[in-house]
Image (cartoon, helix red, strand yellow):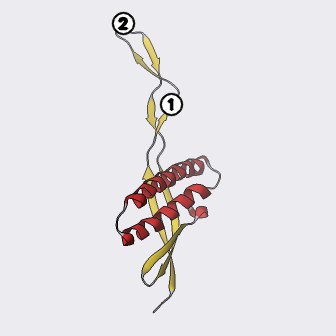
Amino acid sequence: MRGIILTTALILFASTLPAISATCQKYGPQGQVIYYKCYEPEPTYQINWYVTTTTTNDKVVKKVIKPDSVCYDYASGSIDYRGCMSQAKKLFKKKCDKLTKSYRNTGSRDHAKAIKVDKESYCRAARVI
């Protein structure tokens, strides 16, 4: 039986990226204070989004990350929401680049189709967000 099936899935992802804090201090051998730039982990946001999947004949033909669902569990406009969206954009761009490279280097036609579906999904999300 031929048909198109749409499904929605919830995707969860958490990441930690380094950030530079203003200034840290330590004490030298003679007790003098030494100021330096130090790295602290940026807040980690749980990046959630919904995906609409279109299948035909039990094969996934299209995946769409719903842009308005990215970071949906943070209040819109809040600092946490903006931080989550920033990390989500970086994540989608990174996945897009990785899948683009993988798509170019794959030899199997069926595998290439599966990679292409994911690649298009993440690349589109990286552009839209």
Which secondary structure lies at badge 2?
loop
Question: How many neighbours does mark 1 have within 10 angstroms: few (below 14), some (14-19), or many (20 or more)?
Answer: few
Nearest to the observer: residue 82 or residue 108: 108
- Residue 108 image point, x, y percent: 35, 68
- Residue at 48% x, 62% y is 119
Report the residue marked by disc 1: 21
Say whether residue 23 is left or right of residue 31: right
For the C terminus, which image quadrant? bottom right
Q: Is residue 56 above or below residue 96?
A: below
Residue type indicated by callout 2 = Gln
Badge 2: residue crowd in 10 Å (few <14, some 14–19, many ≥20): few
- Disc 2: which residue: 30
Closer to the camera: disc 1 or disc 2?
A: 1
SS assignment at label 1: loop
In this rendered view, identify the residue nearer to me: 51 or 96: 96
Horizontal and vertical percent position of residue 63: 51, 70
Whether residue 129 is visible: no
Mark 1–mark 2 distance (CA, rounded to whole Å) = 26 Å
Image mark for residue 53: none
Q: In this picture, is 46 found above or below 32?
A: below
Do residues under tags 1 and 2 come within 8 Å of each other at their CB atoms? no
